[in-house]
Image (tube, rainbow, N blue to C red):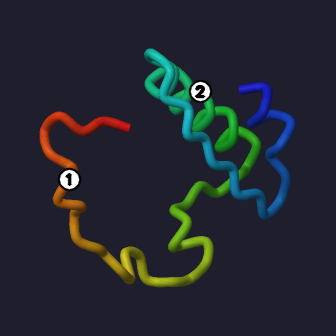
Amino acid sequence: MDVIRSGATNHSIIMSHENFGSSPEELAPQAISYLQSRGFTLMTIDQCLGIAPYQLVGEADPLMDETWAC
């Protein structure tokens, strides 16, 4: 939340890729509430940039089977 509070300015794109434990489930509702209470309009990247989403969807790597993990 500290990063969101300090980084939220007009025309900000804030990307949070945190996936530690329950962080996403705890952070998202707080961040959404905080930003909306300050008048920010939340939208997807494609909406923000005015482009169609998923313009290119590649094929899965054949080496990525059920044992694969990032």
Q: Mark 2 — residue?
A: 30
Helix, strand or loop at disc 2? helix
| Amino acid type of the residue that numbered disc 2 sits on in the rendered structure | Gln
- Residue at image coords 79%, 26%: 2
Seen in the picture, residue 18 relative to 53 is either above or below; the reply is: above
| Quarter occupied by the C terminus | top left
Q: Which residue is mark 1?
A: 63
Task: Give the residue displayed 43% in from the left and 83% down from the top.
Answer: 52
The residue drawn where x is 60% and y is 41% is 16
Crowd class of label 2 (few under 14; some 14 to 19; many from 20; radius 10 Å): few
Left or right of 24: which side holds 64?
left
Looking at the image, residue 65 sits to the left or right of residue 20; the answer is: left
Along the line of sight, the residue nearer the viewer: 17 or 32: 17
Please identify the residue farthest to the front as the structure is shown: 63
Residue 20 in the image, given as x and y percentages of width and height: 50, 21
Q: What element does badge 1 sit on? A: loop
